Image: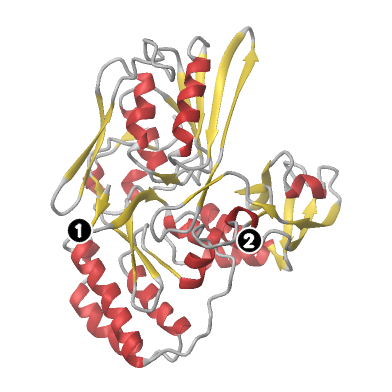
């Protein structure tokens, strides 16, 4: 879906931008007229496109009068970015982000260089558990595995930053996301870099011993996908069959909702169609193309079923689960009718929450895990005069009866924003 020629994704942008950034913000002198033009452009984009004409209770006109002099006084691009980020932060909502020009351009696959060989990946993931940063995933053949890292180890320091200091920073951050999401962002930002870069990480291993290992970043795995001015996404997908107690189930994991994964998802469902259960693992999946939700959900419904509705200022977009009555080869089949479960955690966001929340509301699946991020606000991007990219929320999710702490909540009861779009394992 294109809105005013802007790319539209249902994705948690703030965390994505932080984790993808591989460069420090440049300190570049800035002409006063360009600074004001850039600030005014960012203000106008929000003013004209935000789904909520009350701007979440913020007097948007007065805010321009307050911050425009600060933008005019900005001596370099870094100071200007702080002013614009202050403006966006006043809304208190997700999916508003300022992407530095150098970050957007450095992750552009249209350049001559091969982007997949430039963007580094540590080959591991972490989560905050009981105030400790725990390695929850080590990729087979990845950088962390090569360095000897194992799942379950505790991270003590990342590239010289003690975890205690990162946790203090996460606790003091004004972001609306959970502390777990914030600490994840801080850790992954410090691990980010080009392929070949070295990262020193201190661990506590399973024997309670301390180790300091050097992780050499490897090229980021996955299929590079580019949408407009967004940083490049790397689509990854895994599926496997497991057996337990005489029963068999298929497990499907993917990191974002992207077009290259459509055929992989369909093929996996085809393989698992006769099994006793299907598990969709959305832990760490921060969203993507929301329209994919309808097709994937259709594998589990025999009748067209409403999953929710999104609303812009002018239009509505209804999400339906459309029954899938043919397999990948075009042969007639029945939608999967067996037990289905969805796994979520604090890093499950946006399109993943639409999928999980919509299917949970209809009673088709059971949800297991942690409360999700609460960030169902589709965004679009637009270039600013100084070259930076502004991502703004343009759609509101208005009809999702999400289960929050075991209680069916009216999404309007808590107003616009993120709070009503959280799901809880039940």
Q: Residue 350 in the image: state x and y as whole percent.
A: 39, 45
* Res. 418 visible in picture: no
Total numbered labels placed on residues in the image: 2
- Residue 107 against residue 235 in the figure, above or below: below
- Residue 189 against residue 354 in the figure, above or below: below
Q: Residue furthest top?
A: 246
Badge 2 marks a residue whose secondary structure is loop
* Res. 420 visible in picture: yes
Mark 1 neighbour class, 10 Å CA radius: few under 14, some 14 to 19, many 20 or more? some
Residue beneath disc 2:
192
Q: In the rendered image, which quarter is residue 389 located in?
A: bottom left
- Residue 170 against residue 3 in the figure, above or below: below
Residue beneath disc 1:
52
In the picture, which quadrant includes the C terminus? top left
Q: Residue 84 in the image: state x and y as whole percent.
A: 36, 76
Distance (Cα) linking label 2 and label 1: 35 Å
Taking depth in this image into account, of 184 and 274 the one nearest to the observer is 274
Q: Is residue 158 left or right of residue 313?
A: right
- Numbered tag placed on residue 251 in the rendering: none
Which residue sits at x=44%, y=48%? 373
Q: In the rendered image, which quarter is residue 57 located in?
A: bottom left
Q: Residue 73 in the image: state x and y as whole percent.
A: 37, 92
Q: Name the N-terminal-most of marks 2 and 1.
A: 1
Badge 1 marks a residue whose secondary structure is loop
């Amino acid at each position: 879906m294109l809105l005013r020629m802007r790319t539209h994704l249902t994705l948690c942008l703030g965390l994505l931008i932080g984790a993808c950034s591989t460069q420090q913000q440049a300190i570049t002198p800035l002409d006063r007229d360009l600074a004001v033009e850039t600030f005014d452009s960012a203000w106008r984009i929000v003013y004209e496109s935000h789904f909520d004409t009350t701007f979440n209770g913020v007097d948007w006109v007065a805010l321009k009068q307050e911050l425009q002099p600060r933008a005019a006084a900005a001596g370099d691009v870094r100071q200007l970015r702080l002013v614009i980020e202050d403006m966006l932060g006043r809304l208190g909502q997700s999916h508003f982000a300022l992407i530095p020009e150098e970050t957007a351009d450095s992750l552009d696959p249209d350049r001559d260089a091969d982007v997949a060989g430039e963007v580094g990946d540590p080959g591991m993931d972490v989560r905050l558990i009981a105030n400790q940063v725990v390695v929850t995933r080590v990729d087979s053949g990845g950088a962390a595995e090569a360095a000897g890292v194992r799942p379950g180890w505790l991270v003590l320091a990342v590239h010289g930053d003690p975890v205690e200091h990162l946790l203090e920073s996460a606790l003091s951050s004004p972001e609306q996301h959970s502390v777990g999401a914030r600490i994840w962002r801080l850790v992954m930002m410090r691990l980010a870099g080009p392929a070949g870069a070295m990262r020193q990480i201190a661990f506590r291993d399973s024997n309670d011993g301390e180790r300091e290992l050097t992780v050499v970043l490897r090229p980021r795995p996955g299929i590079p996908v580019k949408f407009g001015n967004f940083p490049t996404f790397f689509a990854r997908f895994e599926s496997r069959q497991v057996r337990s107690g005489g029963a068999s189930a298929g497990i499907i994991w993917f990191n974002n909702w992207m077009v290259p994964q459509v055929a992989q998802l369909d093929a996996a469902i085809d393989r698992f169609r006769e099994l006793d259960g299907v598990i969709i693992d959305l832990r760490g999946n921060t969203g993507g193309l929301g329209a994919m939700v309808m097709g994937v959900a259709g594998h589990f419904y025999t009748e067209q079923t409403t999953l929710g509705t999104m609303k812009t200022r002018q239009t509505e977009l209804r999400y339906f689960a459309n029954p899938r009555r043919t397999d990948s080869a075009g042969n007639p089949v029945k939608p999967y009718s067996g037990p289905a479960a969805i796994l979520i955690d604090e890093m499950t966001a946006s399109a993943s929450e639409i999928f999980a929340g919509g299917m949970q509301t209809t009673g088709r699946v059971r949800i297991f895990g942690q409360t999700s991020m609460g960030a169902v606000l589709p965004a679009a991007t637009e270039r600013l005069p100084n070259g930076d990219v502004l991502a703004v929320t343009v759609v509101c999710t208005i009809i999702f009866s999400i289960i929050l702490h075991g209680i069916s909540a009216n999404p309007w009861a808590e107003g616009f924003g993120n709070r009503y779009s959280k799901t809880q394992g039940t």
